[in-house]
Amino acid sequence: MATSARSTQMLQPLLTPWYRVVSDGDRLLLEHGESVVAFEGAAVRSLLPALLPLLDGTRSIDDIVGALGEPVREAVVRAAEMLAAHGLLVDGPPAGAPAQAVARVVGIAPAEARARLAAARVAIAGVDNTVISSLLRRAGVERVESYAGNSDVDLVIGFAGDVDLRELNRACVEARTPLLPIALFNGRHTLVGPIVVPEISACHECVQLRRAANLPFGNDFSLIEETSPTAAADPGLQAIAAGLATHLAVRWLATRDPLLPGTLFAISPLPRPTVAEHPVLRVPRCPVCSPAARMAAPLPWHAAEAL
């Protein structure tokens, strides 16, 4: 018996593995991220206890009906539709915890997230950060290498201090290669991101121009940035920055989450540890990423300076 229901079009429906299942008499509670879906009624007692274990991403609806019996086909289909309507079903097969973690961000199948991570290629520019390399591999990114000007990668992660982030940004924009810059701790915060998607989101130069425009020493900002900060971040703060950078990289590689490009994250240890996010828009006449800066000369009054 065929069905056109969306849930049963999944080849191997998988109960979303990030929900925990709690039985409470005639109720069944599924919770994730402090959001709860509750089911009540006869089906909780008679059908769901037998059905849920079979929604493991390895069986089709027909396989499940074969295990439970043809007389319950209609009930199985209705239950699957109900679960899918609440976002509790994704396509199988199942995948490991790292893939599940990023898959839940946008609701893609864990197996799809795992495949994207396995196929991704990441280049690290600057210091050989074994922490980030290790975290990327643990997350399922199998190809992590040192950056050598190669543009045929899915993401470049650049560390300030060992490389000139402005030059790296220019190279990535020209090669149309996404970039995740990580700045050194400057005594106030460590800046991670934003992920630069050439021709789409703000580049690193846009970020620097925006920062200069909002700091009281903006006229000297570029000069000061040419010298590396002498403030040292403690190992814990370094680990937080490495973890956040890895999270952003994995999330981008697996889901292309549109919320990440153009968002700068500032990790501040004082007066109390915080992670703040700051949206960054493209600078209309950015000398690196703006076509307008190369196509037309500004009007005479565009950059007038006080004498």
Image (cartoon, helix red, strand yellow):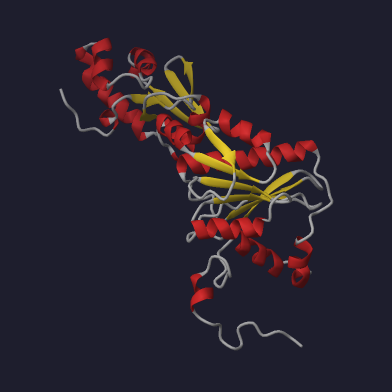
**Picture coordinates of residue 85, whole percent (x, y):** 35, 34
Direction from residue 97 to residue 135 in the image, left or right: right
181 vs 141: above or below: below
- Is residue 201 among what the camera can see? no
What percent of the width, then of the height, locates residue 185?
Answer: 77, 49
Residue furthest out toward the front:
148
Judged left or right of residue 44, residue 270 is right
Residue 44 placement: quadrant: top left
The residue drawn where x is 54% and y is 41% is 122
Q: In the image, 260: left or right of 183?
A: left
Task: Identify which residue is drawn at 68% across, 56% down.
Answer: 164
Total marks shown come to 0
Q: Is residue 294 above or below residue 134?
A: below
Q: Residue at x 61, y 87 (%)?
A: 301
Q: Quadrant of the C terminus?
A: bottom right
Query: Between 274 and 41, which is closer to the camera in this rendering?
Result: 274
* Residue 302 % position (x, y): 60, 83
Q: Residue at x 50, y 56 (%)?
A: 175
**Residue 180 shows up from this direction:** yes
Front residue of this view, candidates 230 and 59: 230
Question: Which quadrant is home to the N terminus?
Answer: top left
In the image, 162 versus 38, the foreground residue is 162
